[in-house]
Image (cartoon, rainbow, N blue to C red):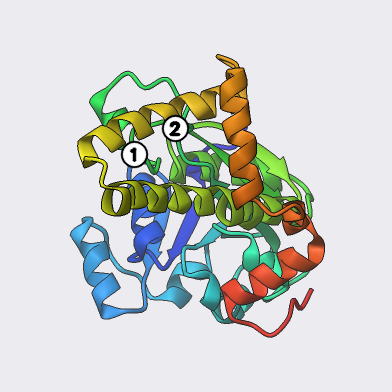
Amino acid sequence: MIDINDLTIAVIGAGGKMGQRVSNNFKTTQAKVFYAEASPVGQERVRALGLEVTPTQEAVITADVVVLAVPDTVLGSVSEQVVPLMKSGAILMTLDPAAAYAGLLFTREDIEFVCAHPAHPSIFLERTTKEEYADTFGGIAAPQNVVAAVESDSGDVTERADVIIRAMYAPVIDVHWVTIKQLAVLEPTLVETIACMIGELLKEALEETVNTVGVPRPAAEALFYGHIQVALANALRGDNPFSEACHIAMGHGREMIVKDDWKRVFDDAVLDDTITKMLKIDAIRR
């Protein structure tokens, strides 16, 4: 059984948003961790966490696992700098699947490539403390799942990756393994193109109710937030089936708001188009 404390880890981009999150969790382990950050502002953030900044080359050459906690748009160029420096058999880990799906990562036959994306605490998570309620993103107090993908699975790569994933996203309930393409369908299609878009639409609907229709905000928020919880519980878990009248209103809303061909968002061509726009590239290169 692999122990994280026996591994050497390099975090590239340790001063960024996600870099700070994973670095904060890594520092609670006894693993040997190098924290690399290019920007002076980011370096100050790393030091503010009580951590020492290590030059990227020095951090990478002895690492068993290199975590690229940098924006998707620069993953390709950063991997070109990092991968040639890595020791044979090491793991390169990214936090989002877009660059791997698009074929932007610099590759080596003797380097394993893993992507691990946090699921964030579920709306159905049973929270028992104030800290868990406050941790809406995950990685601090509220348990979350992680979905991960591996390009190849030689030796103990998933086992090594699993212990890293559970540490950097702690507390973790489980790690679910899928393919790179499946992870790309989940993120962005399912959770960003659909779920996050719907969340933004809900916010716009609330503002329209308050600012255009004139309903007092406290009343609108009270009814809206409660019904969002009920709607999700009913639709996703079948807790309390919707009434006949509600189904009629729901059907009316679907006709007015949702396009008949909306499921084409799951077509490969649409996924490719979404990711090329996200990464600001001309075409998928895989």
Q: Position of residue 112 (x, y in %)?
A: 70, 59
Q: Give the side of residue 85 with respect to residue 227, left or right.
A: right
**Which quadrant is the C terminus positioned in?**
bottom right
Badge 1 or badge 2: first in the primary sequence: 1
Q: Position of residue 259 (x, y in %)?
A: 69, 54
Q: Residue at x 80, y 62 (%)?
A: 268
Report the label total: 2
Residue 228 is labelled as 2
Give how far apart the Cα atoms at labels 1 and 2 are.
25 Å
Q: Is residue 142 above or below residue 98?
A: above
Q: Residue at x 73, y 45 (%)?
A: 178
Give amino acid for label 1: Ile
Give amino acid for label 2: Ile
Q: Give the side of residue 182 with respect to residue 172, left or right.
A: right
Quick one: 96 or 250, which is closer to the camera?
250
Q: Is residue 213 above or below residue 264?
A: above
Q: Residue at x 52, y 49 (%)?
A: 198
Residue 140 is labelled as 1
**Which quadrant is the N terminus positioned in?**
top right
Q: Residues within 10 Å of mark 2 (few under 14, many from 20)?
A: few
Helix, strand or loop for disc 2: helix
Looking at the rendered image, the disc whose residue lies closer to the viewer, 1 or 2, is 2
Q: Position of residue 54 (x, y in %)?
A: 35, 70
Does residue 110 appear in the picture of this structure?
Answer: no
